[in-house]
Image (cartoon, grey):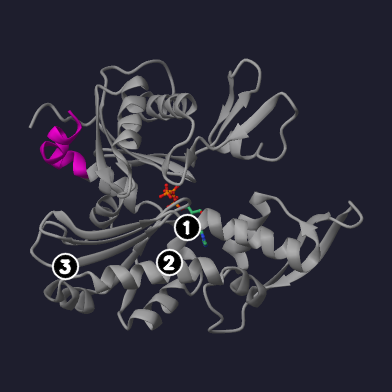
């Protein structure tokens, strides 16, 4: 063990949200993974919440972008700048420079390539880390959900984020089997946009579709679902229009995405050694990530697998908490990245 201190940080560098966990303090930064840039000079106009408000609303010379896609870096320079901004915010409340550079643990999807992983490490070092380490996202999620990952017992975690769904069986401090699906919350949003366009000839923006998903979205209609009024642009007249949409319609729009997630859970279970499967039967499948909050998703997974399903406490924070807690075991992650 070498000099891990209270200034060291864990980052959940997500497609949708970036969270920073500081040892002893908990989650100190929680903002959308969005950066607004001047198109010509590439100068940063805003980061995080301020930048997210600009999505779909920027003038011609400003663009609000999400530099992470499907859990990996799509735009290297912008990601490094975003990490730098959040590291500064986490270490010094955004004022000035680091007193001393932190060691940083960053989570990555389990299906990541060596080149994609290298990019995360390099971007974090470039952003000011003394050194950077990676941890696989479902492993971090399981630590953050308080699962007994270091014990000889099977735990199953399904982390549904913006870009990826990670399914893993964990025992004795390691991933026994896992699958990473590049389908998660963002694809649900896209499916809602496509459905409303097809059924109503109405064009809605990404932020509206995410709001619809959170407010009335559902993985299945086990009960009467709520409805809501939505606004968009009528593709026939070109004018703004308001319609009412039901939860049942949105459940229908989300069907393919939900099926893809359920199928991944099932096929991971099929690859699980029987002793570990028995442990999971006792303890249940644990859902983490923002997608775990989709209404009835726990019920659908439970019905399809015949297993108990539990939503972790604070599902949006599990990966960040687990990434930060893994700093206590940094020697296990040390050599991998050298
Ligand atoms: N109440 C809710 N119902 C449905 N989906 C939700 C809810 N709250 C958040 N989400 C979705 O969860 C996703 C974000 O989750 P999270 O912050 O765990 O992802 P991430 O870590 O940024 O992404 P990734 O792990 O793919 O890199 C978004 O798609 C968001 O719309």
Say if 3 sits above or below 48 in the image. Answer: above
Say if 77 sits above or below 298 in the image. Answer: above
Observer-nearest residue: 104 or 4? 104
Q: Which residue has dot 1 on it? A: 184
- What's the distance in space between the residues labelled 3 and 1, CA to CA? 24 Å
Range covered by the magenta-colored residues: 326-338
**Helix, strand or loop status at disc 2:** helix
* 328 within the magenta span: yes
* 61 within the magenta span: no
Q: Is mark 1 within 8 Å of ligand 1?
A: yes
Residue located farthest toward the right when viewing the structure as drawn: 237
Residue 148 horizontal/vertical position (percent): 16, 61
Residue 321 horizontal/vertical position (percent): 30, 47
- What's the distance in space between the residues labelled 2 and 3, CA to CA? 20 Å
- Mark 1 touches mark 2? (CB < 8 Å): yes
Earlier-in-chain disc, 2 versus 3: 3
Image quadrant where residue 156 sits: bottom left
Circle 1 crowding by C-alpha within 10 Å: few under 14, some 14–19, many from 20: many
Say if 180 sits above or below 220 in the image. Answer: above
**Quarter of the rendering occupied by the C terminus:** top left
Q: Which residue has dot 2 on it? A: 261
Say if 295 sits above or below 327 in the image. Answer: below
Earlier-in-chain disc, 3 versus 1: 3
């Amino acid at each position: 063990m070498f000099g891990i201190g209270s200034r060291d940080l864990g980052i959940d560098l997500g497609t949708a949200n970036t969270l920073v966990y500081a040892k002893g303090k908990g989650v100190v930064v929680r903002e959308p993974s969005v950066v607004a840039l001047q198109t010509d000079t590439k100068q940063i106009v805003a980061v995080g919440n301020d930048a997210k408000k600009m999505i779909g609303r920027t003038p011609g010379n400003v663009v609000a972008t999400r530099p992470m896609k499907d859990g990996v870096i799509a735009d290297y320079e912008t990601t490094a700048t975003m990490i730098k901004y959040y590291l500064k915010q986490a270490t010094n409340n955004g004022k000035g420079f680091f007193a001393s550079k932190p060691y940083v643990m960053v989570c990555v999807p389990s299906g990541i390539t060596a080149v994609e992983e290298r990019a995360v490490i390099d971007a974090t070092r470039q952003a000011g880390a003394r050194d950077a380490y990676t941890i696989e996202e479902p492993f971090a999620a399981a630590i953050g959900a308080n699962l007994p990952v270091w014990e000889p017992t099977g735990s199953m975690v399904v982390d549904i984020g913006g870009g990826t769904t990670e399914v893993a069986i964990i025992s004795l401090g390691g991933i026994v089997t896992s699958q990473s699906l590049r389908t998660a919350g963002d694809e649900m949003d896209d499916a809602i946009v496509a459905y409303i366009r097809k059924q109503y000839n109405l064009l809605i923006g990404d932020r509206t579709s995410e709001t619809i998903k959170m407010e009335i979205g559902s993985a299945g209609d086990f009960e009467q679902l709520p409805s809501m009024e939505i606004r968009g642009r009528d593709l026939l007249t070109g004018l703004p229009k308001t319609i009412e949409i039901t939860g049942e319609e949105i459940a229908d729009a989300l069907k393919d995405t939900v099926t893809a997630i359920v199928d991944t859970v099932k096929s991971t279970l099929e690859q699980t050694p029987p002793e570990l499967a028995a442990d999971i039967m006792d303890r249940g499948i644990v859902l983490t990530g923002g997608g775990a909050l989709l209404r009835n998703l726990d019920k659908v997974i439970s019905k399809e697998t015949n297993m108990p399903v539990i939503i972790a406490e604070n599902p949006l924070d599990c990966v960040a908490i687990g990434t930060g807690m893994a700093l206590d075991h940094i020697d296990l992650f040390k050599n991998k990245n050298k």
